[in-house]
Image (tube, grey):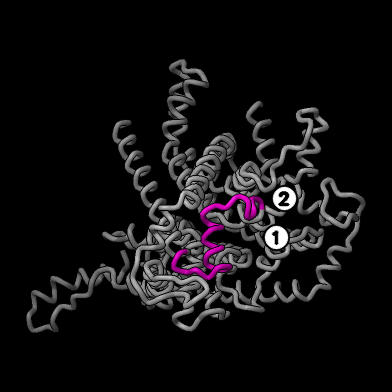
Amino acid sequence: MILTFVNALILLFLTAPIIVVVATAFTTTGYPVFPPQGFTLKWFERFLAMPEFTEAVRRSAMLALASTAIAAVLGTFSALALARWQGRGQKAVAALMLSPILFPAIVLGLALLVFYSQIGLAGSFNGLIIAHSLITTPFVIRLVMASLSEFDPALEEAARNLGAGWWRTFLQITLPLIRPGVLAGAVFAFILSFDELVVTLFLAGPGMATLPVRIYTYVEYSSTPTISAISTTLILAWVLIGVPVYVRFLSIKHV
Amino acid sequence: MSMEATRLEQLGPISSAAPKAPAPRTVPRNWSHLLLLTPNLIWIGLFMAGALVVLATMSFRGYEAGGRGILRTWELTHYAAFLGDPFYRDILWRSLGMAVQVTLWCLILGFPLAYMLSRLRGWSRALLYFTILMPLLTSAVVRTFGWMILLSNNGFLNKTLISLGLTEAPIPMMYRMTGIVIALVEVLLPFMVLALDAALLNIDRQLYDAARNLGAGATRIFLLITLPLSLPGIISGSLLVFVLAISAFVTPALIGGPRIPVISTLIHQQGIALLNWPFGAAISFVMLFTLLVLLAVTLSLAAKAEGRAR
């Protein structure tokens, strides 16, 4: 009983900033106040009327799509190999491939900035795509490996024994079975890339600001409910995309 | 093991028994694995390892402010400048202190939550899991923005504290370490809960039943079973939160501002605003080295503790 009460307070703390951001998006005051006063949708209208933000949304979406495509392929291949390889070196390679999760983004940002300036990728959109794929691939690896842990290798062997080649076995047996993991990994990678700020801050050339960069530079100097409206839209989008994928992934995993 | 490898093994003895047959193919067992790993290994090797080597080289280059910029010399001046100047050493200590505070608070707040999560089953578990995970799907910028609204001098938190009579004047939390720690704990708490939950799930429920049947009370069960057996989760969660806290940029930059510089905002300032890449690179490696030493010490202590427990 006490534990439930304590946990309710901790959950309140955990969700507090999200509640505040969503609530202040509807305030009629000119600056974000909590609790909000009145009710208005004008901040959402203002967001949609500001090309610097709508343009940034489009750019972020393209960047996230491109880097997710790379991460999904690299991550799925790596997970398939890591899940079956039981030999020596598996642990070391797995640790290396998952290391971007723990690697300080601020250092990766500076390293890529210096590196790109020497190989001619400085300030380019391709450079951003590569950087984002580095950051998101480990999460695809993790989620695909999780879905592979329930995978019965006998199914693949059966297909091979019946004469299916490697590629056919992969397309018709392996891929359909790990699809929830790949899908969850891809969705997570997309959201991560869309939200990524630190590395992007180092690498985005002039006129290449993504939505998080725009929000950051805005928040640094001023405070307006427009930012709350943008954030609320994002939160809503992620919940709408995230929940179905999450439920599907869970129902496969039998948690 | 893949079918391919099994087949080759079966073929092996046959082909060596018949010398006229084509020479046995000495294909390594794991070639298909290696093939699948290659694209990602190349990607990481080129863009992560490659970039870090370039950054390491950069940290030994000379730099002339305002003049010729980055020089093609080899020197240790940047490391000496960082470690020799109390101003910079203070920034390093402040960052470490901040990460320690954030980690401890995440442990204190994360344990009860993870404990409850690990005992739930079915859809109630899925629901709580998603509630804890959802903040992770909200970017750190957005959550920090929420905290900026809450923490300001005439914000909700201070107004509540004053109306409750807990304080006379507003407690300044924006542009203070207090504010950074509060917001960072919230940003990183989900990572701690997930790590603790994984460890708590691994504890055999029968241990609790056995202890209870033998007459142990709730406190004893917690101290003698739950706590020691969740140690792997405590260690992995703490390491994760510590590393993420010390490298966090958005929250210290927005809530602390230039008044409270930490190591990550210093790296950003040197790299972007001042364009002193060699110094930024040197600070980066001081930070990486510090983290490596701390990781190594913690992991070896953990291994020793585990050895003693057996």
In front of the other: B243 or A2: B243
The crowd level at tag 2 (other Cα within 10 Å; few <14, some 14-19, many 20+) is: many
Q: Is residue A135 left or right of residue A158?
A: right
- Give me the residue at 85% from left, 68% from top: A46
- Residue identified by numbered label 2: B148
Q: Secondary structure at mark 2?
A: helix
- Residue identified by numbered label 1: A220
Marks 2 and 1, how far apart at CA: 11 Å
Q: Chain of mark 1?
A: A
**Main secondary structure type of the part rendered in magenta:** helix
Q: The residue under label 2 is which amino acid type?
A: Met
Q: Which residue extends farthest right?
A: A38
- B37 vs B251: above or below: below
Position of residue B40 measured from the top left corner of the image (x, y, whole percent): 41, 71
Q: Is residue B27 left or right of residue B125?
A: left
- A25 vs B45: above or below: above
Picture quarter with the N terminus of chain B: bottom left
**Does the magenta run of residues contain B124?**
no
**Does the magenta run of residues contain B272?**
yes
- B122 vs A56: above or below: above
In front of the other: A218 or A8: A218
Q: Secondary structure at mark 1?
A: helix
Q: The residue under label 1 is which amino acid type?
A: Glu
Q: Chain of mark 2?
A: B
Q: Which residues are magenta?
A: B255-279
Position of residue B284 measured from the top left corner of the image (x, y, whole percent): 45, 60
